[in-house]
Image: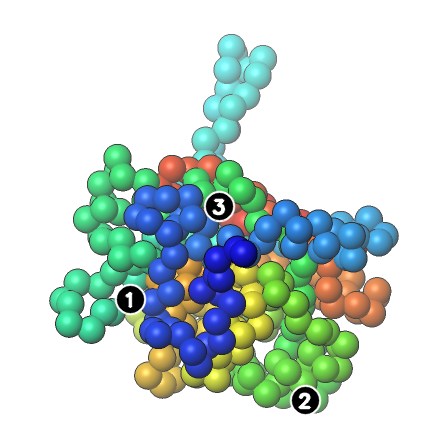
C-alpha cells in the first residue's frame, strides 16, 4: 500500500497548516513542493480531457512590463550585440522576473515561525542558505527539470464584475471574495479537480495597458506603499485552496492576494513558504479570457517551463494554454 501523502489530509486535520514541509532538505521532493501532485497520470488525464481543438494561447506579458517599476525593482533591459561585424547578432537580457509575468519560486517568500527570531523559507530553508550561491536548495531547477503541466481553470472575475457593474481600480485594496469565486465557478460550470492550476483574472494588465497614463504609472512607481487588488486573504480561502487540491495558483494581479493585507493573514506565508505551492503573478490573461468566452469553457491544458537556474528565485512562466 502506498504511503498517504500529506496533501491528502483535509485542511482542518493538518497538524500545522502553516508548515506542510515535505521531503528531506535539498531533495527533489522538497524542491518540487506541491507540484509533486502533478504526476504523469494527472497530466495525461488533463491532456486527454482538455486538448480538443488545438487552439493555443500564451500567457506571458511583455518582458518590458511593468515599465514603471515599484519597490526599487529595475526595469528590463535588452541589448542587441553584433558579432563578426554584423554578420550575426546576440542579445543580452537584464531583467527582474517580478517586473512581468512570473512564477514566485520557493526562495521568494518566507514566513514567521513561533519561537524563532529568523523567518524561514519552505522546508526550514534559511536566508543564509539562499545567500550562499553554492547552495541550490529549493531553487527553480527543480520546477524547470519537471515542468509545470496540467489542467488549468480560469475564474474570470474581471468579466463578472463588469457584467454586474462592480467598478474598481486594480491599484486599490479591492478584494475578490471567495463567495464570488465560487459563484463564477458555478456559472462557468467548473468542477475543480485535484492537480488543477487556478487562474484568477482581475484586470491589472488590461488597466495598465489601456487605461493608465504615463503620469499615473509614475505615481505608482514612486509610491512606497502601493495598493494591489487581489483575492481576499482569509482562513476560508486557505481552506478552499488546500482542500480543492490545487497544484499552483496564478493571476494577472501584482501580488495574487490583496495587498497590503486587510487582516491578520498573508497568503504568501502559507502558500509559498508553508505549502511549497507556486504563485503566478502578472500573467497576461486577456487573450485567454476571450478564447474561454468563445469556446464557452473555462478549463484547458497548460504547460510551463520555468528557467533552469540552479538556486533561482523566480522565473517567467513560458506558459501556453491549449484548448
Q: Is residue 113 left or right of residue 62?
A: left
Report x, y in % for residue 53.
85, 52
Relative to 93, does residue 147 appear above or below in the rendering?
below
Nearest-to-viewer mark from 3 and 2: 3
**Structural distance between the alpha carbons of marks 1 and 2:** 38 Å
Mark 2 neighbour density, 10 Å: few (under 14) some (14–19) many (20 or more): few
User: Where does label 1 land, which residue?
Assistant: 111
Q: Is residue 54 left or right of residue 79?
A: right
Q: Secondary structure at mark 3?
A: helix
Residue 36 visible in the picture: yes
The quadrant in which residue 119 appears is bottom left
User: Where does label 2 land, which residue?
Assistant: 165
The quadrant in which residue 219 appears is bottom left
Toward the viewer: 112 or 100? 112
Mark 3 neighbour density, 10 Å: few (under 14) some (14–19) many (20 or more): many
Mark 1 neighbour density, 10 Å: few (under 14) some (14–19) many (20 or more): many
Report x, y in % for residue 28.
42, 44
Q: Secondary structure at mark 1?
A: loop
Look at the image and name its color scheme. rainbow
Q: Could you say which disc has been placed on residue 98 in the image?
A: none
Q: Is residue 26 left or right of residue 96?
A: left
Residue 269 visible in the picture: no
The answer to whether the residue labelled 3 contacts the one labelled 2, judged by CB atoms less than 8 Å apart, is no
Instruction: State the quadrant of the N terminus.
Output: bottom right
Q: Could you say which disc has been placed on residue 143 in the image?
A: 3
The answer to whether the residue labelled 1 contacts the one labelled 3, judged by CB atoms less than 8 Å apart, is no
Nearest-to-viewer mark from 1 and 2: 1
Toward the viewer: 101 or 90? 101
Report x, y in % for residue 236.
48, 84
Sequence-wise, which precedes: disc 1 or disc 3? 1
**Structural distance between the alpha carbons of marks 1 and 3:** 21 Å
Amino acid at each position: 500500500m502506498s504511503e498517504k501523502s500529506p496533501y491528502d489530509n483535509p485542511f482542518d486535520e493538518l497538524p500545522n497548516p502553516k508548515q506542510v514541509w515535505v521531503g528531506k532538505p535539498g531533495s527533489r521532493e522538497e524542491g518540487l513542493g506541491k507540484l509533486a501532485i502533478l504526476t504523469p497520470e494527472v497530466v495525461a488525464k488533463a491532456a486527454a480531457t482538455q486538448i480538443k481543438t488545438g487552439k493555443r494561447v500564451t500567457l506571458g506579458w511583455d518582458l518590458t512590463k511593468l515599465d514603471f517599476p515599484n519597490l526599487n525593482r529595475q526595469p528590463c533591459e535588452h541589448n542587441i550585440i553584433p558579432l563578426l561585424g554584423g554578420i550575426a547578432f546576440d542579445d543580452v537580457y537584464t531583467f527582474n522576473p517580478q517586473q512581468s509575468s512570473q512564477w514566485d519560486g520557493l526562495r521568494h517568500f518566507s514566513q514567521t515561525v513561533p519561537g524563532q527570531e529568523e523567518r524561514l523559507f519552505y522546508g526550514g530553508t534559511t536566508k543564509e542558505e539562499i545567500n550562499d550561491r553554492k547552495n541550490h536548495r529549493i531553487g527553480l531547477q527543480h520546477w524547470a527539470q519537471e515542468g509545470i503541466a496540467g489542467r488549468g481553470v480560469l475564474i474570470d472575475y474581471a468579466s463578472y464584475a463588469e457584467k454586474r457593474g462592480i467598478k474598481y481600480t486594480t491599484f486599490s485594496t479591492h478584494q475578490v471574495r471567495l463567495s464570488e469565486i465560487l459563484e463564477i465557478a458555478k456559472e462557468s460550470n467548473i468542477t475543480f479537480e485535484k492537480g488543477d492550476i487556478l487562474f484568477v483574472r482581475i484586470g491589472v494588465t488590461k488597466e495598465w495597458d489601456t487605461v493608465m497614463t504615463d503620469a499615473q504609472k509614475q505615481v505608482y512607481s514612486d509610491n512606497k506603499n502601493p495598493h494591489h487588488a487581489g483575492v481576499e486573504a482569509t482562513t476560508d480561502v486557505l481552506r478552499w485552496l488546500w482542500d480543492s487540491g490545487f497544484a499552483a495558483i496564478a493571476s494577472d494581479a501584482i501580488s495574487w492576494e490583496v495587498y497590503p493585507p486587510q487582516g491578520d493573514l498573508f497568503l504568501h506565508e502559507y502558500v509559498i513558504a508553508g505549502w511549497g505551492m507556486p504563485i503566478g503573478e502578472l500573467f497576461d490573461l486577456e487573450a485567454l479570457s476571450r478564447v474561454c468566452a468563445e469556446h464557452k469553457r473555462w478549463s484547458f491544458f497548460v504547460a510551463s517551463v520555468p528557467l533552469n537556474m540552479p538556486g533561482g528565485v523566480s522565473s517567467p512562466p513560458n506558459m501556453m494554454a491549449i484548448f
